[in-house]
Image (spheres, grey):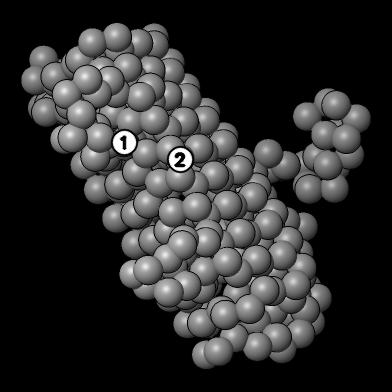
Amino acid sequence: MLGFELGKIDPSARIGRNVEIGQSVTIGCDCVIYDNVRIGDNTVIGPHCILGEPTMAFYRDASYDNAPLSIGPNSLLRAGTVLYAGSVFGEGFQTGGRVSIREGTKFGRHCRVGTLGDIQGLCEVGDYCSFHSNVHIGQLSSIGNFVWIFPYVVLTNDPNPPVGPMVGVRIDDFAAVATMSVILPGVHIGSDALVGAHALVRKDVPAEAVVVGNPARQIGTIHDIKGRPDGQAVYPWREHFDRGMPWEGIGYQAWNERRRAGLA
């Protein structure tokens, strides 16, 4: 395909100093890869991506040196993705189109950020997290493993805008935040919790709680939710969903037992 051929680096790509490119890496047309970027094996970088985008210090400090950016193997960055210097992305990282992720961010393995995702830097994200399109993650957010954040969710960080100081949101493992929810600064969402669509979350959410509304209030636990139309249990979701998860094909319980035995 013109300007984007798998396994090849398009001649229009601009590549800086001290860039490490692994085996079988694809780089599409008009990409810019700044200094000190490391790209893992079998990674695909779509057209018009910018990797190692300089931080604000570049515009103020004549001695500026780009902090390293590391992208794990088997990643897929779709067209227009911008990753700033000084971040780390684990194996199997994926983006949709026109994603922007600021400096000082760390993602674990097999995470996804959907189209127009905006990650504001200084964030930490665990393994197997999925952020859908148009998600905004404020600075200092801390997100565990296997977390779902659905479209148009906003995690805020300034309790007294614009004065600060900033306080990030914390979301524990296996939690899910439904579309168009807003999480206010410093809120802690517990493991396996479910935040309903359009919720405004001002207070901490206990583990396994279901909260809805503006302001959000608890209406039960995830064990109260039954699927439609059969009325069967659907939560904890990890016991009923496996696509793209490390327990795919064997079930969560079997995988967890193997993990605890050091076999997974």
The amino acid type of the residue labelled 2 equals: Thr
Q: Where is residue 143 drawn, in percent x and y? A: 59, 52
> Residue at the location (37% across, 51% down)?
120
Task: For the residues labelled 2 and 1, say whether their Cβ atoms are less than 8 Å apart.
Answer: yes
Q: CA distance from mark 2 to mark 1?
A: 9 Å
The amino acid type of the residue labelled 1 equals: Tyr
> Label for residue 47?
none
Q: Is residue 105 above or below residue 236?
A: above
Classify the position of the N terminus by image quarter.
top left
Element marked by disc 2: loop
> Residue at the location (23% across, 10% down)?
17
Residue 93 in view in this figure: no
Element marked by disc 1: strand
- Quick check: 95 left or right of 190? left
* Residue where numbered disc 2 is placed: 105
Q: Where is residue 207 drawn, in percent x and y? A: 77, 68
Q: Is residue 49 above or below residue 17?
A: below
Classify the position of the C terminus by image quarter.
top right
Q: Where is residue 109 drawn, in percent x and y? A: 57, 34
> Residue at the location (45% across, 40% down)?
105
Upstream in the sequence, badge 2 or badge 1? 1
- Quick check: 251 left or right of 46? right
Q: Is residue 94 above or below residue 213?
A: above
Q: Is residue 119 above or below residue 48?
A: below
> Label for residue 84?
1
Question: Of 235 and 102, which appears nearest the observer?
Answer: 102
Q: Where is residue 20 drawn, in percent x and y? A: 35, 11
Q: Determine crowd level at label 1: few under 14, some 14-19, many 20+ residues with C-alpha closer than 10 A.
A: many
Number of marks in the image? 2
Q: Quadrant of residue 110?
A: top right
> Residue at the location (38% across, 17% down)?
38
- Quick check: 240 left or right of 159? right
